[in-house]
Image (cartoon, helix red, strand yellow):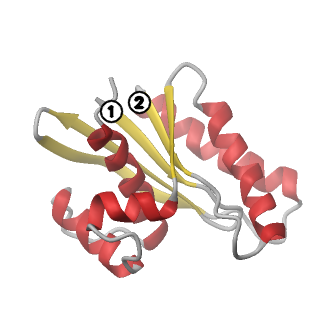
Amino acid sequence: MRVLGVDPGLTATGYGVVQAKGDELHCLASGTVRPRVTDPLPERLAAIHARLREVMDAFHPQVVAVEEVYLARNAPSAMLTAQALGVVKMLACGCQLRAYAPREIKKWVCGSGSAPKTQVMGMMGHLLRIDQLPTDHAADALAVALCAVMDGRP
């Protein structure tokens, strides 16, 4: 199974592609899309769309997994992030789409829903045997992809 995991955001959208064959896990790609914050919203969303489309075309995932937007802290910010999430969900057309809450992701990959970002980054390095740890947004995206792998859904 090949999974594209995405941690959506308007200032930074992390992505990670994980290949699972049996018990073997491989990180095929990861990175962060950083649209210019001075660009208007449509251009920022277009930049996210363009880069993720390139990743989709290069790796052809069967599953797209996303981190759902967390609303409790800042509703206006969450509404903007939800627009980036909409771009990702649109790109998932033709793939299975799975969504996970932030605490659920941390629980699956670290054993605790309140794990700090540094622990998520370290676990991604360990589980995927990555020498250079991914940045926080890319690590979050890889963690989302691993949730889809561990989820067990066909």
Q: Residue at x 44, y 72 (%)?
A: 136
Q: Residue at x 40, y 25 (%)?
A: 62
Residue contact at pointers 1 and 2, CB within 8 angstroms = yes
Q: Is residue 123 left or right of residue 34?
A: left
Classify 87 as above or below 38.
Answer: above
- Mark 1 highlights which residue? 2
Q: Residues within 10 Å of mark 1 (few under 14, many from 20)?
A: many
Image position of 14 with respect to 99: above or below: below
Q: Which residue is mark 2?
A: 61
Residue situated furthest left in the rendering? 23
Q: CA distance from mark 1 to mark 2?
A: 5 Å
Q: Which quadrant holds the N terminus?
A: top left
**Residue nearest the viewer, comparing 47 with 24:** 24
Q: Secondary structure at mark 1?
A: strand
* Residue drawn at x 70%, y 41% as measured from the top left: 87
The quadrant of the rendering that contains the C terminus is top left
Answer left or right for 93 relative to 28: right
Q: Residue at x 34, y 29 (%)?
A: 153
Question: Residue 133, percent across and down?
Answer: 29, 71
Give x and y (percent) for residue 91: 62, 32
Amino acid carrying mark 2 in the image: Pro
